[in-house]
Amino acid sequence: MKAKQFLPVLLLVAGAGLAPVSAQETPAKPLPTSTESGEKSLLSVVRKGGWAVIPLVGLSVFTVTFIAYSFLTIRRGTVVTRKYLASVDAYLKSKDYLGLVALSSHEGQALARVVHATLEFATRNPGVRFAVLREIAETEGSRQTADMFQRVSYLFDVGIIAPMLGLAGTVTGMITSFHVIGIDPEGMRPAMLANGVAEALIATAGGLVVGIPAMIFYSVLKGRASALVSELEAQTTNFLAYLELQHDPRGHVDRQPPPPPGAHKA
């Protein structure tokens, strides 16, 4: 009888002892790392932004890519280099215009395009007046300048379009929220109401996140482009001034090299 009375007690003690062991043997689920939780939270926030997030993501990718491209192309090496200036000076001193045209045709610099357009017209039209050559050089220089500023203006467009898209997403999000209020004015369905407000705020933030950096880099690149345009204008003026000195009194380009010293002496 005593053994039967102590049996339930022994079973309870054994069960209490086995419970911690079984709990320890059960593998615990790994806690998510901060990086994984951050990625999931960011992805969930983006998903709540509504339709406006899709074009904003595309604009953000375009903005980053275009900023990198602009810093590589809007620099002094794409406008003029010291090596090319030395070559231009040597060819002009020897009046080897055909050689300078051939050299400039293989150069991608802005000044090389101006020199190539000017001297190519001069070599194809013997006897052309210098005023015509000046006009050709100025026209080509204006085209190079416009191309440079046109590339920078794309960032300005992004800086305007991105906040407008964010504003459009804000409007649609608020429309969703007020639609929920109209359907159920008493209960107002807090979850659906919160989704509409979240969509509005996320769209606004997305537009600002894309637009503000675009405007900042637009200002930086515009200043760089203005400095390079001034450099192009200065070098073009020097080229035209040197070319004008090599004209004959009638105003025509003298394409013949000067006679060597003493050639006319008996």
Image (spheres, rainbow, N blue to C red):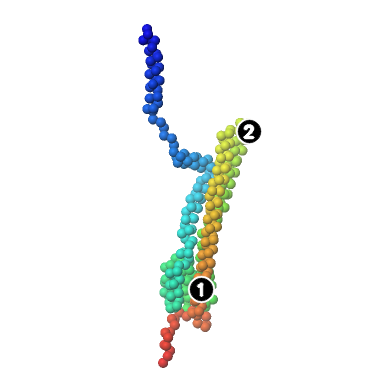
Q: Position of residue 140 (x, y in %)?
A: 51, 68
Question: Nearer the viewer's eye, disc 2 or disc 1?
Answer: 1
**In the image, what residue type sits under mark 1?**
Asn
Q: Residues within 10 Å of mark 2 (few under 14, many from 20)?
A: few
Q: Is residue 105 left or right of residue 214?
A: left
Q: Position of residue 143 (x, y in %)?
A: 52, 66
Q: Residues within 10 Å of mark 1 (few under 14, many from 20)?
A: few
**In the image, what residue type sits under mark 2?**
Pro
Q: Position of residue 210 (x, y in %)?
A: 53, 50
Q: Earlier in the sequence, mark 2 or mark 1?
A: 2
Q: Position of residue 166 (x, y in %)?
A: 56, 47
State how far apart marks 2 and 1 are (Cα).
Answer: 76 Å
| Of residues 92 and 247, the one drawn nearer to the viewer in this rendering | 92
Tell me where residue 194 sits by quadrant: top right
Residue at 39 percent of width and 13 percent of height: 8
Residue at 45 percent of width and 41 percent of height: 35
**Residue furthest toward the left?**
3
Residue at 57 percent of width and 45 percent of height: 204
Q: Is residue 18 above or below residue 147?
A: above
Secondary structure beneath dot 1 equals helix
| Of residues 113 and 266, the one drawn nearer to the viewer in this rendering | 266
Q: Is residue 187 left or right of residue 232?
A: right
Secondary structure beneath dot 2 equals loop
Q: Is residue 25 left or right of residue 45?
A: left
- Residue with the mark numbered 1: 238
Q: Is residue 174 above or below residue 99?
A: above
Does any portion of residue 60 appear in the rendered image? yes
